[in-house]
Amino acid sequence: TCGVLNCIFVGYVFGMYPQHFWLVYLLQGSFLIPTRARAFKRHTPFNIIFYLMDFVCVTNITFLISIIMAIFNCIMPNPLVPVEYYKFFSLAAAGISCGPLIAACMILPVVCLLFHDINTMADLFIHIFPPMVMFTFRWNVTEINDAWPGVFKLDHLHSANFLPLHLGTISGNTIRFYFAWFVLYTIWMAAVLVVGNPLPKKKQRGLLPYAVETVRIPKYDSQFHSLMRGGLCTFIGRLWNRSKAESRIQMELNQFEIKDFLTYMGGHFVFVSCSTFVIGYPCLKSKTFHGFLLILMTAIVTLRGAKRYTYYATQMYGRMLRESFNDLLDTRSYQSSHV
């Protein structure tokens, strides 16, 4: 019930009061992201708290912090954050929200509208809300400035150029923000894959050539490891002429190679870069195109959710009922044969 009412509320505020929609994003993000973090920490069998280091999570956390800093800059006599930093992050948020996040929302099957699952709703939130907020920031500047005078200085969103890739342009700030995350995340994950701590690996090699392999209990997980176990390892293995049997062994041991991770990050870089220019540029130039993609994005995630509910109501529960009846029939058959 809360999920359905929330969707109605979000749609109503976005359509009727776009100047206040950022407040909905701030309030719901302040609830959903910490809730998501707690769920990640309590997840079994692996603690998946490191999922928060993914680009989409880092982007949303940065976006929320920048909104909070804008509020404090308006309230405090002396700005807490220089205006230049705020302009940098706002332009980067524009490129990321209207490019990679819209593309990911339309492509990733895990992004769907499920009312009953708060974790799935949080996943939907971090993908679909930033493009909606940026729509209001880009195309409802007058209403926002009238309703919240002095809080958001959005004139630079209209005056800023998308190209070239210089500091102070939308594409330049977007690529710089992404590159900063890309370098830090790649260094951290490469170190994890080399050393083997603290992410899950059933066997850990000793640091010396003669050291004996020791069995260890996995504790943490990452998005990369999860995707690789889900079949990405086999796909990347084809690029390196690796056999399916060897890929299955790596998936079973949860132990992957540096070249696999670099291939994964290379694909991530190409996806973010291409979507920034192919989708982000026309979105920030045309209100009609931006609105069309928001409608298309909403339709796609709703269709995915409808298919998931259809599966729950028919196939999954039907299979459970058949298994229960089969167990019941087997029990009665066994009892009849021993009477």
Image (spheres, rainbow, N blue to C red):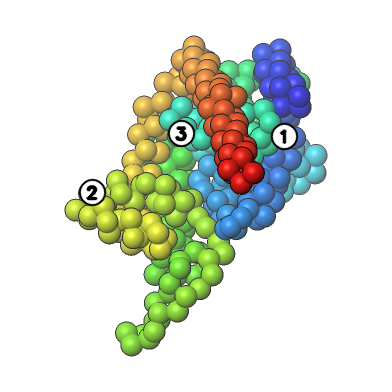
Going by the numbered disc 3, the residue's amino acid type is Leu
Q: Earlier in the sequence, mark 3 or mark 2?
A: 3
Q: Position of residue 255 (x, y in %)?
A: 39, 63
Q: Is residue 246 left or right of residue 283?
A: left
**SS of the residue at dot 1?**
helix
Going by the numbered disc 1, the residue's amino acid type is Gln
What's the distance in space between the residues labelled 1 and 2, CA to CA? 42 Å
Q: Is residue 207 left or right of residue 52?
A: left
Residue 63 can be seen, yes or no: no
Q: Is residue 294 above or below residue 200?
A: above
Going by the numbered disc 2, the residue's amino acid type is Arg
Residue neighbourhood size for the residue with mark 2, other residues' Cα within 10 Å, grouped as few (<14), some (14–19), many (≥20): few
Q: Quadrant of residue 49?
A: bottom right
The label number, if any, that marks residue 306 in the structure image: none
Q: Which residue is mark 3?
A: 108
How many marks do you count on the picture? 3
Q: Earlier in the sequence, mark 1 or mark 3?
A: 1
Q: Quadrant of the C terminus?
A: top right
Q: Which residue is mark 1?
A: 28
Q: Front-most of 86 and 333?
A: 333
Q: Front-most of 215 and 31?
A: 215
Q: Is residue 208 above or below residue 13?
A: below
Q: Quadrant of residue 28?
A: top right
Q: Quadrant of residue 71?
A: top right
Q: Position of residue 183 (x, y in %)?
A: 42, 56
What's the distance in space between the residues labelled 1 and 3, CA to CA? 22 Å
The label number, if any, that marks residue 238 in the structure image: 2
Q: Depth-wise, is mark 3 or mark 2 nearer the camera?
A: 2
Residue ID at (47%, 32%)? 109
Q: Position of residue 226 (x, y in %)?
A: 46, 51
